[in-house]
Image (cartoon, rainbow, N blue to C red):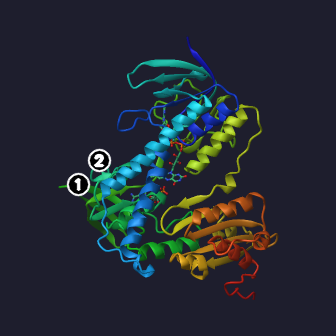
């Protein structure tokens, strides 16, 4: 007999698994279909984020940072750490355990909330029927009142550098190196390229990042991007802007990468090459020809502001639809859709999705950049505070970077918070909370911040917006 559900979710990434749990919590009979299998051939939940994305990359970023600190930065504290070595397979093994723990945790949450897991490939047919094909090739059809498509994304391939997951790898391969490459190339100076490049640079690789654009981190505030480029370059990352990769050749476990830049045609030989040029939506065999679901011109599933597709009762969320390819954006869309299916009037604030680059120092922002606001003709006041003037940052020997608060010159409402520095992601979240409640810079300035904390840098930057910072000289108003 055909199983019937109120909600069937295709994909158990941070979009799909959160949507499924929320739907079940709201009393809806829910199933979630997932096809991803781990190295042991077992279904693993959590999608890109838990298996080969956010979590494993942060595990390696944290491990490699500890090594880098122990090796080169303990002496200043009076700590002698001689003969610090790195066991790469052990580091990779720790990462694998974290992934296993978390993906297993999602399976436990499914059980606890009564979500039915259907293992296999899901395909939406006409009339909100969904076909599930198991790894043994057997198929079953389930019926749904509502379907949520959450099939996520995968790395983009570029013909000049075909991935072989040996010498030329994508982000997944770069999380599995068993030794530190001597010379590492990275194509793409986006979030993923910078994070993975940083991991291996800290462990001793000589890293060159080739970026086709002339501008570094074009989505970030220019002041922050400039500071980031300076800092990463000082850390030893060779970032070559305006360098478009045109070809590559793998020979004897090395790869020669050809690229063009302002000086003409160039080539560099690397031991490993990471291709990190972006991600594309996964829609392969997801929709039957008569499913009725429309795609947009870039291959994403077309949805409105509430994630409804062109078919009533069918929704799509996360990386497979327009907008930032971020786990927290996917999850919040999942919550919104589950609530709307349950009859609530949920909305999501797309203007306040924080962005983070987990390098060291971290880079994070929420709201608009100074350049965006200028283009829109909005007059602003800007306050900045450098971590070099923060007692807490000094105590931690981590004084690089700054906090920047941008407020509307007329209303003083905070329109953007941008941070490069220690715990930038956590600080920006404080800005996001304030902005969600329509905070002014003055409101933030009037609040009591614990001393000594890194958060005081946000406090001071907010005060500086109106020339009232205490621990830094204020810019004189002309
Ligand atoms: P996914 O996580 O891609 O999950 C989709 C799931 O659907 C997959 O498990 C897939 O197997 C399954 N699936 C697809 N098609 C079918 C089908 N037909 N049937 C059954 N199952 C199917 N984001 C952040 O916010 N913070 C970070 O720090 C961060 N770091 C990242 C680091 C790396 C190296 C990478 C690659 C990504 C990172 N991201 C980060 C991005 C983040 O992983 C994605 O934005 C997020 O996973 C998107 O969630 P999703 O649920 O839309 O899709
Ligand atoms: P993101 O989309 O943020 O992950 O960043 C990917 C980056 O890769 C972008 O900044 C692109 O400009 C860059 N990129 C794409 N193709 C190439 C190429 N052939 N050579 C160098 N950089 C590239």
- Considering depth in this image, is 72 or 372 the residue closer to the camera? 72
- Considering depth in this image, is 451 or 127 the residue closer to the camera? 451
Query: In the rendered image of this protein, does residue 54 appear above or below residue 401?
Result: above
Going by the image, does 146 lie left or right of 284? right
Going by the image, does 256 lie left or right of 113? left
Measuring from the top left, give residue 257's x and y in whole percent. 29, 61
Measuring from the top left, give residue 184's x and y in whole percent. 31, 63
Q: Which residue is mark 1?
A: 250
Going by the image, does 164 lie left or right of 334? left
Q: Which residue occupies the extreme front position in the image? A: 79
- Considering depth in this image, is 407 or 461 the residue closer to the camera? 461
Choose the circle earlier in sequence order: 2 or 1.
2
Q: Which residue is mark 2?
A: 164
Secondary structure type for disc 1: strand
Query: In the rendered image of this protein, does residue 157 appear above or below residue 24?
Result: below
- Residue in the picture at 66% in, 67% down: 417
Residue 455 image label:
none
- Residue 88 visible? The answer is yes
- Residue 11 visible? The answer is no
- Residue in the picture at 82% in, 69% down: 411
Q: Which residue occupies the extreme left position in the image? A: 252
Q: CA distance from mark 2 to mark 1?
A: 10 Å
- Considering depth in this image, is 143 or 291 the residue closer to the camera? 143
């Amino acid at each position: 007999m055909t199983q019937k559900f109120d909600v069937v979710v295709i994909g158990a990434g941070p979009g799909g698994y959160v949507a499924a749990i929320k739907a079940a919590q709201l009393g809806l009979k829910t199933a979630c279909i997932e096809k991803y299998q781990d190295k042991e051939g077992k279904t693993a939940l959590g999608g890109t984020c838990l298996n080969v994305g956010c979590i494993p990359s942060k595990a390696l970023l944290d491990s490699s940072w500890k090594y880098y600190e122990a090796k080169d930065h303990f002496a200043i504290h009076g700590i002698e750490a001689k003969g610090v070595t790195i066991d790469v397979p052990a580091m990779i093994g720790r990462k694998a355990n974290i992934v296993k723990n978390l993906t297993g945790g999602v399976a436990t949450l499914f059980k606890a909330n009564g979500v039915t897991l259907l293992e296999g490939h899901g395909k939406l047919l006409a009339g909100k029927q969904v076909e599930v094909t198991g790894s043994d090739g057997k198929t079953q059809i389930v019926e749904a009142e509502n379907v949520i498509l959450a099939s996520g994304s995968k790395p983009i391939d570029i013909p000049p550098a075909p991935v072989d997951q040996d010498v030329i790898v994508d982000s997944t391969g770069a999380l599995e190196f068993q030794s530190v490459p001597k010379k590492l190339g990275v194509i793409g100076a986006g979030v993923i390229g910078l994070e993975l490049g940083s991991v291996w640079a800290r462990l001793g690789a000589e890293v060159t990042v080739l970026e086709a654009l002339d501008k570094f981190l074009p989505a970030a505030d220019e002041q922050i991007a400039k500071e980031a480029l300076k800092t990463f370059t000082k850390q030893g990352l060779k970032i070559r802007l305006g360098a478009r990769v045109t070809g590559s050749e793998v020979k004897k476990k090395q790869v020669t990468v050809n690229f063009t830049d302002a000086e003409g045609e160039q080539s560099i030989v690397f031991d490993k090459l990471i291709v990190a040029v972006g991600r594309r939506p996964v829609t392969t065999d997801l929709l039957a020809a008569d499913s009725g679901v429309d795609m947009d011109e870039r291959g994403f599933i077309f949805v409105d502001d509430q994630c409804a597709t062109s078919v009533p009762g069918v929704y799509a969320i996360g990386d497979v639809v327009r907008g930032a390819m971020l786990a927290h954006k996917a999850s919040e869309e999942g919550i919104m859709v589950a609530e709307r299916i349950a009859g609530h009037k949920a909305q999501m604030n797309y203007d306040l999705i924080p962005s983070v680059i987990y390098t060291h120092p971290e880079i994070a922002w929420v709201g608009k950049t100074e350049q965006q606001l200028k283009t829109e003709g909005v007059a602003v006041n800007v306050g900045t505070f450098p971590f070099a003037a923060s007692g807490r940052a000094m105590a931690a020997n981590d004084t690089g970077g700054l906090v920047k608060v941008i407020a509307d010159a007329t209303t003083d409402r905070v329109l953007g918070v941008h941070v490069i520095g220690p715990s930038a992601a956590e600080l920006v979240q404080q800005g996001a909370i304030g902005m969600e409640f329509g905070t002014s810079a003055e409101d933030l300035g009037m609040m009591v911040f614990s001393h000594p904390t890194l958060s005081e840098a946000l406090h001071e930057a907010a005060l500086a917006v109106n020339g009232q910072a205490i621990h830094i000289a204020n810019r004189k108003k002309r």
